[in-house]
Image (tube, rainbow, N blue to C red):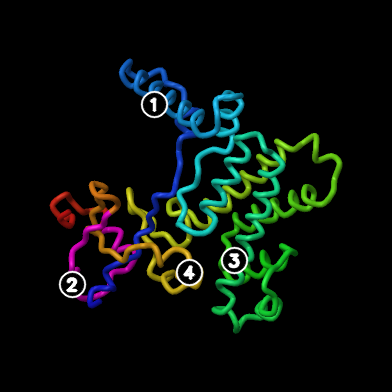
Amino acid sequence: MADRGRRRHLSYTLDFDTRAVLLEQEPGPGWSEETTRLHLENREKVRQGLAAHFGGQALERKVADFVAIKSKPFSVLAYHNQLFEQVRGAFVLGAYYPALVGACALGERILNHLILDLRGAFTHTPEYKHVYRKDSFDDWRVPIDTLAAWGVLVPEAVTEFRALMALRHRSIHFNVSTYATLRDDALAAILHLRQIIEVQFGTFGLKPWLIPGTAGLMFICKSWEDHPFIRAYHARSCPFVGPYVAISFEQGLQYFDHHDYGDGDWSDEEFAAVYSAREPGHLAAS
């Protein structure tokens, strides 16, 4: 591709769920009567949707638990999406112990996947000798420290994994005090897991591999394109586009882009400047 120096991987996903935000938000004092009416109607539709999905019995408790988990993160599509949905569903149904165990198990699965998927790219590192023989890891300290040293885990993910690890040790191994704190522990585990997915696999927000200053869409930095983590989890599902890309939902998710952005390379700052200055007439025809 001759113009690849003027393209970037678009960080985009359709795996998210913000219904919890809608349920929690109350009409504001400055809202118009029509805006308030529509908001309340939409909120009631969400409540009825939850009733249809999880059952109408104990609906208020189920709605409260659904809201407590907050919105589902905007995440790249991987194995964790469906499994997180199952953990969330167990919690909303009131199955707090399965939700607690599931959240801890999914945290461990994410760590194992990251090590097994990426270690081949880090054979030259001193940490490799600690992980190359095993096919799974139940001592979380090894994969957490290794992935942090490899520059795979962002600092906040390291913090959240360690917090989830402590909760896992206290909850999974026999502890009679668990019975009294099941809901609180399950919610804490899910929120740790949710934050891990948000900061490590999220497609929006402040992340070291995303170009700042591109309101509306996010793009992966040029210097991160060849990072093993980005190649394995982000770039493979992110279209390689220019700043005038257009997105359409008329026939499902479709991307439209110009065929040629010209010769030469743009820095990330130059790419962001061109993107920010674009006008409707610049966009690719959809």
Compared with 17, 63 (above or below) is above
Marker disc for residue 262: 2
Point out the stretch of residues depicted in magenta. 254-273
Q: Determine the CA span between mark 3 and mark 1.
A: 38 Å
Q: Is residue 45 left or right of residue 190?
A: left
Q: Secondary structure at mark 3?
A: helix
Q: Position of residue 162 (x, y in %)?
A: 70, 55
Q: Determine the CA span between mark 2 and mark 4.
A: 28 Å
Q: Residues within 10 Å of mark 4 (few under 14, many from 20)?
A: some
Q: Secondary structure at mark 4?
A: helix
Which residue does the numbered mark 4 point to in the structure image?
Answer: 232
Name the one closer to the observer, 250 or 31: 250
Q: Is residue 261 magenta?
A: yes
Give the amino acid type for the residue marked by disc 4 in the picture.
Ala
Name the one closer to the observer, 258 or 205: 258
- Residue drawn 69% across the image and 81% down it: 129
Q: Residues within 10 Å of mark 1 (few under 14, many from 20)?
A: some
Compared with 105, 233 (above or below) is below
